[in-house]
Image (cartoon, rainbow, N blue to C red):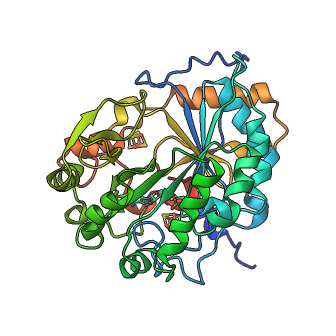
Amino acid sequence: MTDRVIPLADLRYAASLPRIPLIETPPTGLLGDTLGRPLRDLRISVTDRCNFRCSYCMPKEVFDKHYSFLPHSSLLSFEEITRTAKLFVAHGVRKIRLTGGEPLLRKNLEILIAMLSGLRTPEGEPLDITLTTNGSVLARKAQALKDAGLQRVTVSLDALDDTIFRRMNDADFPVHEVLEGIEAAQKAGLGPIKVNMVVKRGTNDSQILPMARHFKGTPVVLRFIEYMDVGATNGWRMDEVLPSAEVVARIGAAFPLEPIGANASGETAERWRYKDGGGEVGVISSVTQAFCHDCNRARLSTEGKLFLCLFASHGHDLRALLRGGHSDAQIAGAIGLIWQARDDRYSELRSAAGGTDAPGAEPRERRVEMHYIGG
Ligand code: SAM
Ligand code: SF4
Ligand code: SF4
């Protein structure tokens, strides 16, 4: 008897088969989870592959040539993604962010963007469609993305210094090509552009001021993200987290800042503006100031599993329903049940416990990786 080979991917990404409600109730757009949080933001990972190997996300030692990424047949097709997104919109989603892995590596992504742009809210409004990219191929693709209906992009950029940047992406990718991508996106009208910088103490915190200086006085909104303990492979340590308060203090000492209010509920960034009118910067304090209380984000993995929290270790297999002949009403009903049962608030629990881990949380090694569910 030969051993049954279980694909690694299935072991890594546990998911359960969602329950279909016995009585169909059409989505009202008023769904709330156990903490009363609505469902507004859907992040869709369109690929688990990436051409960078940022150590905080896909460290080279793990994501090497032996790592088995998902086969193409596992990925949701554009039709499946659009069908699912439509059901989420009926439940109240207003914003869709395409992410990954590196979303611009997914072939013909413009076609998906055009399909998603055709969706409308129950009030007949278009959705807010955006994309997070490492910017490596943005210069080439910006115009086509805009033409397909993309409204904005967020570009990740961890340093201006070429040596530090190449070390951060660990793929020897030069910084000037990302800067050219940002410029092309601006020209194509994909603004206001946000630039996200993950800050790792001792690795790229020397770049906080150069980055602030570079984007000050431009329409680009620079945001600093605390290095998070997502996934199981990045070897996260609390002493490598540079608290946002320190980022604000360092920038403020050079260029005085004042706080501004949040744009919308569920907004993750705390916003600051330069007192001299040089624009704004933001900080995302996922570690030191958890914002679970109004977290309205759901994440759809590359292969169609629904995750309710960045720190989840368990998903809900919507693809099984999509490919199992279930109706839209049945799948919408299943999504409703899943969201209503949601009680995730990992970061708050971690903070309450004093920093390093949330009590009662799944062990770190079981946590899903960020490149798979999307950031
Ligand atoms: N590849 C694209 C990119 O880098 O923009 C999209 C996917 S990436 C997973 C989305 C975002 O997650 C990026 O801004 C990245 O910097 C951020 N990210 C990944 N790992 C992180 C970590 N451990 N802590 C904080 N942010 C992280
Ligand atoms: Fe790739 Fe983005 Fe992860 Fe960096 S953060 S490895 S660019 S998916
Ligand atoms: Fe949302 Fe989970 Fe992050 Fe809290 S820890 S803000 S629930 S994704």
Q: Residue at the location (32% across, 29% down)?
A: 261
In which image quadrant can residue 126 be found?
top right
Q: Residue at the location (64% across, 70% down)?
A: 69
Which residue is nearer to you in this view: 118 or 375?
A: 118
Q: Residue at the location (63% across, 74% down)?
A: 68
**27 relative to 3, above or below:** above
Q: Confirm whether residue 99 shows in the render.
A: no
Which residue is nearer to you in this view: 126 or 53?
A: 126
Q: Residue at the location (36% across, 36% down)?
A: 292
Say which quadrant the N terminus sits in.
Answer: bottom right
Residue 348 is left or right of residue 21, and the answer is left
Residue 170, image x, y percentages: 46, 80
Which residue is nearer to you in this view: 2 or 56?
A: 56
Residue 291 is left or right of residue 129, and the answer is left
Which residue is nearer to you in this view: 228 or 369?
A: 228
Residue 206, image x, y percentages: 25, 70
